[in-house]
Image (cartoon, rainbow, N blue to C red):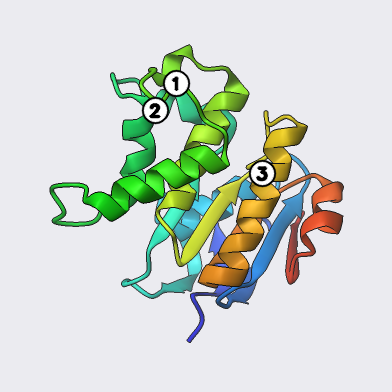
Amino acid sequence: MSLLSVKNLSLEYINNIISFELERGELIFITGANGSGKSTLLRGILGLAKILSGEIIINKDLKLAYVPQAEAERTEFNFPASIREIVLMGRQRPYKLFYNFQDKQAASYAMARFKINNINNNLSKLSGGQVRRVLLARAFCSEPDLLLLDEPCAGLDAQGREIFYDYLNDLRLNLKTGILMVTHDEQQDLILKPDKVIKLC
C-alpha cells in the first residue's frame, strides 16, 4: 500500500487537478511558479486547506513530519523553549507523557548531524539559517514514514545544504521514508534525483 495516495484532487487556489502515489523510499518534488499553490498542496495533505473535490488517502498509523516555509518558523515557536526541547518535540506521540533514552539519543544525534550548538538557547536568538537547521533536526529525529518539506534549503548555507542532502538520502535508503518536497531550485533536481516531479501552473 502507498504511503500517500492523491486522487483527482482539487484545492482552493490551485488550478491543477492532482493525482499521484508516494511509495516508501520515494522522493517527489513539487515545482511551479510563485503563487501556483505548492505550499497549499502540502497544507491540503495535512488537512489545513479546503478540498474542493477528490481524495487524499494516508495510512493513519504512519509517523508524519512537516517542515513549513522559513517565514512560518519563528511564529511557530513564540514561547520559551530551548533548542533541545524543540528538537525533542519530533519524538512526541499521542498519549506519550515522557521522553525516554531513545528519544533523547535520537534528538542528540540529529542535532550533532546538523551541527547545532548552544542547545539550551532560545530559538529567538538564532539566525534564519540556524532556525532552519533546528526545524529540520526536529523533523528528522522523529524518524518519519512520511516527510513533507516546504522549501527546506531556504536560508541554509552550503554546509547546511550538504548536511541536509546527506540526511535526506539516509532517510530514503535506511528508513524507506517517503518524501514530498516543495522546491524551486533546479540544482536540487540534479543532486537528489527525485523519482517524480509534480509541476503546478
At a point 30% along the width and 55% down the height, the residue shown is: 102
Residue 12 appears in view = no
* Closer-to-camera residue (167/68): 167
Which disc is residue 161 wearing?
Answer: none
Question: Which quarter of the rendering shows the C terminus?
Answer: bottom right
6 relative to 75, above or below: below
Could you say which disc has been placed on residue 118 in the image? 1
Q: Earlier in the sequence, mark 3 or mark 1?
A: 1
The image shows residue 138 at horizontal and vertical percentages of: 43, 43
Whichever of labels 2 and 1 marks the residue nearer the N terminus, that label is 2
- Residue 200 pos. (x, y %): 73, 56
Amino acid on which the number 1 mark rests in the picture: Asn
Asked if residue 116 is positioned above or below residue 20 in the image, the reply reads above
Residue name at image x 74 percent, y 71 percent: 195
Please name the amino acid that badge 2 sits on. Answer: Ile
Residue type, mark 3 in image: Ile
Which element type, helix, strand or loop, lies under badge 3?
helix
Task: Please identify the residue farthest to the top as the structure is shown.
Answer: 125
2 and 1 marks in contact (CB < 8 Å): yes
Q: Which mark is residue 83?
A: 2
Name the residue rendered at 47%, 60% in the picture: 45
Write down the residue under mark 3: 163
